[in-house]
Amino acid sequence: MTRAQNVYKEKVAPELKQEFGYESFMQVPALRYISLNMGLGEASQDNKLLQDAVNELSVIAGQKAIVTRAKKSIAAFKIRQGMPVGCKVTLRRMQMWEFFEKLVNFALPRVKDFRGLSDRGFDGRGNYTLGIREHTIFPDLNQEKVDRIKGLNVTIVTSAHTDKEGKSLLSNLGMPFA
């Protein structure tokens, strides 16, 4: 069990149960999965860029990334249906908790001029999405082998029904909101 998972079971779940008046621990919001997405528009012309992105995202997540392909052709962007446009990883169970702990404790404090995360990233159903401009903030990456700095989207999907429940869950788990 990771430290974050242990904190959730022993501290966060009882606090949320009391705060929102749940009758059962099964009603308490929890993390379902974390999705990492790297969109690479230039990857359709440069295969090396795509392979580097897949390898780097795999190192960050600790799980093999898959290539995402275009669903429709878009002439203005010179993209045809089926061309590679990015990569993604979906983390569940133990890998999800390990990544969450790494994100909160190691990666976010390394962001330049970090003043906390915005609470506008909630979608209305308790899920939170944040954008990371530099994927190099993760300590797992070898900085010398990174050719190009890429952006990364992190979506944390919870079982919460409202944004208030989701924010309470994430902030009790240690997510640094502004």
Image (cartoon, rainbow, N blue to C red):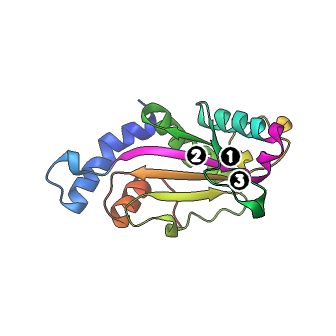
Amino acid type at mark 3? Gly
Residue with the mark numbered 3: 151
Report crowding for label 2: few under 14, some 14 to 19, many 20 or more residues within 10 A (C-alpha): many
Residue with the mark numbered 2: 36
Residue at position x 73%, y 40% in the image: 53
Q: Secondary structure at mark 1?
A: strand
127 or 101, which lies in front? 127
77 or 127, which lies in front? 77
Amino acid type at mark 2? Leu
Q: Secondary structure at mark 3?
A: loop
The correct choice, above or below, for 19 with respect to 90 in the image is: below
The correct choice, above or below, for 66 with respect to 169 in the image is: above
Kindly report the distance in space between the C-alpha atoms of the residues bearing marks 1 and 3: 11 Å
Q: Is residue 81 magenta?
A: no
Kindly report the distance in space between the C-alpha atoms of the residues bearing marks 3 and 2: 11 Å
Q: Are marks 3 and 2 in contact (CB under 8 Å)?
A: no
Question: Tag 1 or tag 2, which sits nearer the N-term?
Answer: 2
Count of marks, rendered view:
3
